[in-house]
Amino acid sequence: MLKWINQLFSPTKTADKTDYMKKFLIVGLGNIGAEYVNTRHNIGFKVLDYLAKKESLDFQTVKLGSLAEYKFKGRSFFLLKPNTYMNLSGKAVQYWMEKENIPLENIFVITDDLNLSFGTIRIKPKGSDGGHNGLKNINLVLNTNQYTRFRFGISDEFKKGRQVDYVLGEWNDQEKEALPERLEIASEIIKSFGTAGLENTMTTFNGK
């Protein structure tokens, strides 16, 4: 009898597990406020804004951020722009991860990186915060660094002692001209992460 009962209920459990694995939390890091919209540090927001505009999605003001849901090939992508400011990003990530029951392996964080030349793409399944305060807080709150991050290169073309001004500064004319092509690739990376998987995504896009 017990075996029959287990067989009866196992399809539901399998379905639940499948649904659980088809949900993805895509986090774009940035700072809220008009003065930050076009700054290098806000590339995470910019990537999500680009995808949302392309797919006619609307962001809704929700607890700890702005959120848009994107349905693609049977997957649900929750696009999150935390409103906690960069240094407290982890609180929003943890809240929406738990609220939507999204597994750690389906978390994808988009951030700027001074150590990469402009527009360079680096996707990694884990790693240190690299001195980035947003990643540092996410690592602290989640108590792990075992989540996927998409680092978007902003280069380090600043004079000594001017790092903050550079990171919070706006893109130069040459970067602005190149951004649309980079943002298009970034939007494809998000979709690939949820459909083709991390390994295939890294193979296809890293270094491009």
Image: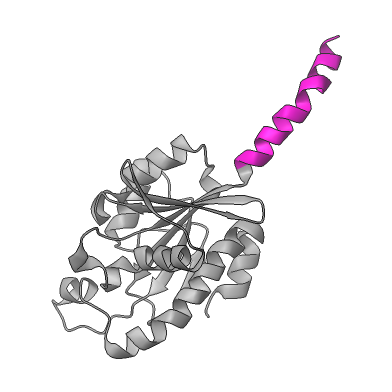
Total numbered circles: 0
Residue in the image at 35% along x and 75% along y: 115
Residue most toward the top? 1
Q: Is residue 104 above or below residue 153?
A: above
Q: Quadrant of the N terminus?
A: top right
As drawn, is 176 to the left or to the right of 12? left
What segment carries the magenta color? 1-20
For the residue pair 139 and 37, the one nearer the viewer reads as 37
Residue in the image at 40% along x and 81% along y: 179
Q: Position of residue 183 (x, y in %)?
A: 45, 75
Residue in the image at 32% along x and 74% along y: 114
Q: Is residue 150 above or below residue 22?
A: below
Q: Main secondary structure of the magenta part?
A: helix
Q: Position of residue 65 (x, y in %)?
A: 32, 48
Q: Position of residue 44 (x, y in %)?
A: 37, 64
Q: Position of residue 145 (x, y in %)?
A: 43, 51
Residue in the image at 81% along x and 20% along y: 8
For the residue pair 133 and 85, the one nearer the viewer reads as 85
Residue 21: image quadrant is top right
Q: Is residue 56 above or below residue 67?
A: below
Q: Is residue 158 above or below residue 96?
A: below
Residue 94: image quadrant is top left
